[in-house]
Amino acid sequence: MRFLIFGMGAIGTYIGGSLTLGGESVIYLERSEVAGRFNLQPLILEIEGKEKTFVPEGVSDSLEEVFGHSPIDVALVAVKSFDTLEVARRLQPYRDQISAVVSLQNGVENEEVLAGYVEKDRVIAGTLTSAVGKMETGKVILEKKRGIGIARGHPLSESIVESFNRANLNARLYPHAGEMKWSKLLTNLLANATSAILDLTPAEIFSDPRLFRIETAQVREAVRVMKRLGYRVVDLPGTPVRLLSVLFHKIPEGIARLLAGKTLAAGRGGKMPSFHVDLYRGYRPLEVDYLNGAVVRFGERLGVATPVNSFLNETLLSIAERPIEENVYRKNPERLIADLSKRVRLFS
């Protein structure tokens, strides 16, 4: 198949490189300065300490040029959620030349945005659970291989999974897109907003009983929204999400906190969560409104209270609008707990 990948970020380079090495045709769409630098130049994918070089079919800054050669079988969208609308608008004039558009993004609203421009029947929900790091433009490292989920229902879903598995991406089909995407969202919530707000590591958050209670509350709110939607929590490739849900619902809090500290924090391999990385590197906007914010929006629509997700979303968005030095919660969990307690009763 012929794949078009938006962007040479960590995920795009990893998937595109794997597909190219697996014998598929891959074209990247990038900014003109990047496209000019890397077109027909080797890119690097590091897996288990070994570097593999690959040369994609092309790196272009022009969709007109891409579609001028031949139709695209699959467009892969792995950009941040706040860039989805721009991608959708750019794809709209060429939608009849695309068989499928796969969203591998975090969040639960991207597919709807894409469907508004390229038609619902062309959009396939996907999710990536492998951890990938970007060393530099054109070089990425696979930090933790887990896999990829692809929703059933599209004529190309099975073929995409087959292509991914030939490329050693550990892909599997899911019968229900909503359950797959919302289950991934649960994993994205953990120690993400709190880490950025407090400038603390996940291990520090999980070791504090009060902060762990905040984590528990935001996950429980999201699961309640899922249940109102009629969705079950499902396991994802390499990610036992159902066990995670049990951890926050049925295991005594003290034991759950110890298990979280040993497994969830350790699973990050010392890496800070994405919101923290983006906030302290000065990247704007942040994706929090597409994760915690999405829980709030669906909760409002369905009549499910989500006060903790609402507080975390509003607080981090507010912090991102100001100089980081003005963040009153930085290394100050007492202040965060006091302010959250004014809105929801979590602490006796």
Image (spheres, helix red, strand yellow):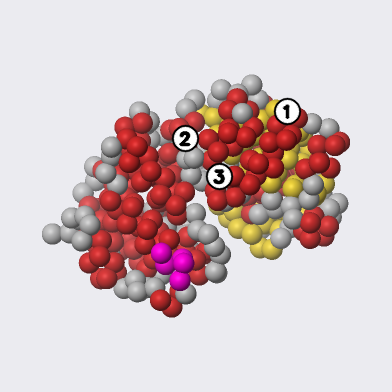
Which residue is the site of mark 1? Answer: 96
Rendered residue at 66%/63% (across/down)? 135
Residue at 55 percent across and 44 percent down: it is: 105
Q: Secondary structure at mark 3?
A: loop
Quadrant location of the C terminus in the rendered image: bottom left
Residue 24 highlighted magenta (yes or no): no
Residue 194 in view: no
Residue 74 pos. (x, y %): 70, 34
**Amino acid type for the residue under numbered disc 1:** Asp
Q: Nearer the viewer, mark 3 or mark 1?
A: 1
Quarter location, residue 303:
top left
Q: Is residue 131 visible from the viewing direction of this image?
A: yes
In front here: 32 or 270? 32
Quadrant including the N terminus: top right
What residue did someone put label 2 on?
180
Residue 83 is labelled as: none
